[in-house]
Each structure stands twice: as structure tokens, then as C-alpha cells.
Image (cartoon, rainbow, N blue to C red):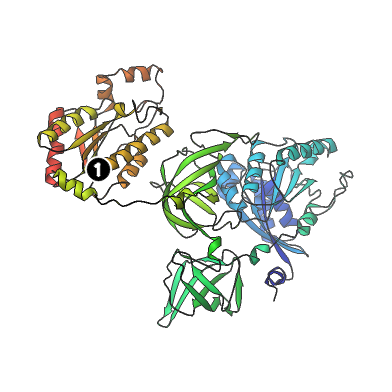
Amino acid sequence: MDLKKFFINQNSKKQLKILTCGSVDDGKSTLIGRLLFDSKSIYSDQISQTKFESEKYGTQGKEIDLALLIDGLQAEREQGITIDVAYRYFETEKCKFIIADTPGHQEYTRNMATGASNSDIGIVLIDATKGILDQTRRHTFILSLLGVNHIVIAVNKMDLLNYDKKNFENIVHSFEKLSKNFNFLSKRYIPMSALIGDNVFSKSKKMPWYADETLISILESFDIDKSSIDEEFSMPIQWVNRSSSDFRGYSGTISSGKININDEITVVSSGEKAKVRKILTPDGNAEFSFENQAVTISLDKEIDISRGDIITTDLDKIKIADQFSAHLIWMHKDNMLPERNYIFRFINSYINGKITNLEYKININSYEKIAAKSLELNDIAYCKIALSKPTFFKSYIQNNQLGSFVIIDQFNNLTVGAGMIDFELRRSSNISWHDMTIDKNKRSTLNSQKPCALWFTGLSGSGKSTIANILEQKLHQLNKRTYLLDGDNIRHGLNKDLGFTDADRVENIRRVAEVSKLMTDAGLITLISFISPFKSERRMARDLFDTNEFIEIFVDTPIEECEKRDPKGLYKKARSGKLKNFTGIDSDYEIPLSPEIKLKTVSKKPEELADEILNYMKKNNII
């Protein structure tokens, strides 16, 4: 049997997933309301409720506000904007549709990207009275980036311009110039009024100059290529099913291709092979299954498969790497900073990692590639990413499930970004760790001490360097081998190329943390005295070390006291505006929540505070 034809023809009607997007108030919700209304996909009680709310919220004389059929959240109705992604279903005689109404407001671009990732066709709404706006450009770029190859450009609100042909042609011309940067397989333009219904379900007599089809006819005519079901089979394992003592199955949703009884599968992580014995679906046993179906597969023999593994019929097509290049959409008001640790969530796993190189970001007006050190909310960029361990993936173009990821803040668990993998970096497979005969334990034994990193953090002028210097002298008197890394001294050499922006501060600490790890590996007691203002980078540094090797020392001095001391005159310069990005004044300091040692400097002398650290080290058998 031809599975491709079976998949397409298994229902009497084809099904298409459509996304509406564009800028705020371009009429997306009204258009979907019109499609639902004209396709008779709304119950009478919904219409009655919408009429009531149209009167309640005011619709300037309109009998019914179609947008209220979609804007389901109370907050949306109060604000008059779409916040979340709303999915609706309707059908015509020829086709079934799942349509997503996505937010136009810039703050909710992440929701638009979510909707686009699952869509076959994109309808780009443009308000005829405003023309192409920044969000129009951004959403068009995201459609292209996420592989939505077919788009309809709906020039809405033509009624407000008396259905002027010239205005429509100008917008078409402008969009053609904009979209030459992308490789859409098809583009269709249509002038319309979603509010009145012109050219939505029926041809408008007010635009005789438009000879093409209505919007619904255009949508029905799309024949989206389903060739992906002919690709190699792959499925991430979501659950190992042991429903009885004599049954072991592997459950998940097929991410690509098709699988038949007796097909041979390979476990990506181990390379072990087995043949498919049964395919179980919600409807019972099946001879075969294909992309997007949820199944449980049992095999002809027991092999080692766990949740998070991937099984496939072609191991060569799946990449295993810890570094790759990817397009990235930043989705949070806090800036993305290269080298900061984040959590990367893939289809079936969570892995720590960082964005190592920000290659460029996109100027959304010109689509020019521009240099940048960080990303702001809604920025789109191309980056290189390094993970703490290898993962399985395909490029996003090959498989949008195995090729996508989201980025999560490690402290508050908020989603801050989304990415589409381009290709793996060769360095991930060409570089391996070389174990040496002389290791940290042998060096420590020779030095007769336990190596550790004493990480001093606090505001400028808090006394970090003074206390660290006194402590090193005391350790030296005890015949301990030490080295003191001081923030100012390091910036004269290793970090002389870095400034004081947030991005540079992150890189400053990353380099110092790596050097500190090497010194600890050499068997030394390493004292590190840096402001290190961000908890994320202090966590990154801690994670480099073995258990109990990293000792965070918070030198707790109020900013008022630091300003009184001001040994370098830096606070005075910062207050006068002569020194930018100064910690505590116009750059944040994130106070450690649970340091190993907290030093109160106002009531004690530096020598006493150094002794507190010595006592801690003796108590914990460090010295």
C-alpha cells in the first residue's frame, strides 16, 4: 500500500493547519471570526453571547464584533488584544481547517512562534491603512525560519480606503521587496475586509479590479506536500511501558517517517538493533504507523532503551553532538548573554548549556546581519551553542521536532528563547578529553593539602581583595600552596580585552572560572576575588568544581559603607555619570542566597574575617 496516499486520503477531506499573524489590530481575530461565522461553525448560543458582549464592550454600531468569538481570555477582552494562541476548527465542503489566532503585540511574539511551528500555511494580515509594520516583517521572517512555505498576504480593512486598487498594489509591491529575502514556495495576495466579509467567502462587488479567488478558495486549493512520511522513521521514547510481567513496550509520538511490523530499528544511544513485533495504537494493533501518531512499539527481543532515547530505522540521519549552530528567537525582557548557563529543552531531554558565540542578529527592517553582544526581547539571531553533554537531533529543515529546542532560565524556570538547529559543529566530534597519568589527587598528595576554590564576591570596595590577601599570607605561613586571582590584576592581562557591559562581565567570570579550575586541578588552594555580580555566573563557576571544592564567600558590605571607603574614587565617578555600568549604581549586584561563608565587614577587622575563613577551612578538613 502507498502510505503517502493513504495518509492524505484516509479522510474524505484534507486537513490544513493555518496560522494568522501580523501586527496589532490588523484584524486577525476578526478574520477568524468571519471564517467561523460564514462556515456556520458557531453555535447559536455563542452568537447570542457575542452579540451581548459586542454591546457591552462597544462596537461602534456593528451588530456583532466577530473578534470576540476568538479573544476568549477576559484579559484579552479588557485590553482589546490577543495574548495567547487560540486554536479554532472549521470546515467547508472541500476541506477541514485548524486555524491559530496568534498575538500581534510585540511582547507576545513567542506565542506567534509557537503557532507557526505547527502550521502548513501562514496568513499574513496587513492593515491597508497602515501598510507593512515592524511586526509584519518580524512575523514574515519567523514564518520562513520555521519552515512555513506557503503564505497568503491578506490586505485587510480595504473598506476604510474605499477599496482603492492603488493602495493594494503599493502594499503588494512593498511585500514583494520584503519577501525576496525568503524562499517561500508560494505567495498569494488578496484585498479584503474581514469585518464586512469582502473576498473572504464571497467575491466583493466593490473590488471588480480583483479577478482572483476568494480567501477560502485559495486556502482550499493548497495541496501541502506530505512527503515527510516517506522519510526514515524516528521516534523519541517518552515512556517504557511495563503494563504486565510479560510485556515491555516503548511509547512515544513518531517524529518522522513510517514504521511497519518486522522493520529493524536501532537505538541511537547504543546502536543496538531489534525488529518490530507489535505496533499498538489507541485503536488497537496496527500493521504500520506514521508521522505524528502516538504508538507503543514492542520488539522481538529485549534491549536497553530508556525514556529520552530515540529509535530509528536509519542511524546515519540522526546527529549526536554537544555543539551546533542554530537560529534563535529571544523571548524574554532580560537580555540573552553569551556564555551564560541556561537549560536547553529538547523533545525528550533537559541539558545544561550556553550560547558560546552570537554570530549575528537580524535587523528586522532591512534583514541585514548585524554584529551584537547580546539579544533583547524578540531579537532573531544566529548562534553557536555548546551543551554539557551530547544530544540527538536532526536539522530543523529535516525534522522540526528533532531539530528544535527551547531555552529555560535555570533559576526561575521561565522559557526565555526558542531555537532551530542548523547543523552540528565538527569540533564537537573532533575534540576529546585526554586523561593524564598525573592527576589532581597525586598533585594534592605532593602538596599535602586539599585543593579548593575560595570565591570572594561582593561590591567594589567591600574588602574582598584585602581579606583575600591577608588570608593568603596566613595560608602561606601554614606552608599551604596558594594562588590569588584578583579582578583588577586579571584585567591587565587575560581579560584586558573586556569591558564592563553585562555580556563582558559574563565572559570575564567564565574565563576566570576556567583558570581557577585548572589551578585547583594543579592541587592549589585558589583564592578568587571578583565582584562577580550575577548569580548565574557564580553557579556556572561552582558547577565546574567537584563536591565541596567551591567555597563561596560573600563579603557583605552595605553600599553606603563601600561609598564611604571608595578607595579608587569609582563610586564618585559613577554617581556623576562619568563611569557607566558600575555595579551597585547602574548595574545590578545579585546577592548570594546561600554562600558557604558570609562576612559582615562593618563591625570586624579584615584580620578577624580572614580568621573566620581559616576556621571554616579547618573545621571542614580543608587545611
Question: Looking at the picture, how far across and down is residue 107, in whole percent?
Answer: 55, 41
Q: Amino acid at mark 1?
A: Thr
Q: Quadrant of the N terminus?
A: bottom right
Vertical position of residue 480 compared to residue 37: above or below: above
Q: Quadrant of the C terminus?
A: top left
Vertical position of residue 59 compared to residue 277: above or below: above
Camera sees residue 270? yes
Camera sees residue 65? no
Vertical position of residue 78 compared to residue 202: above or below: above
Q: Residue furthest left?
A: 478
In the image, is 488 to the left or to the right of 210?
A: left
In the image, is 611 to the left or to the right of 192?
A: left
Q: Residue furthest bottom?
A: 246
Question: Looking at the picture, how far across and down is residue 505, in whole percent?
Answer: 38, 33
Vertical position of residue 402 compared to residue 363: above or below: below
In the image, is 587 to the left or to the right of 202?
A: left
Residue at image coords 66%, 39%: 137
Question: Looking at the picture, how far across and down is residue 7, in whole percent?
Answer: 68, 70
**Of residues 312 and 428, which is closer to you in this image?**
428
Q: Which residue is mark 1?
A: 520
SS for callout 1 = helix
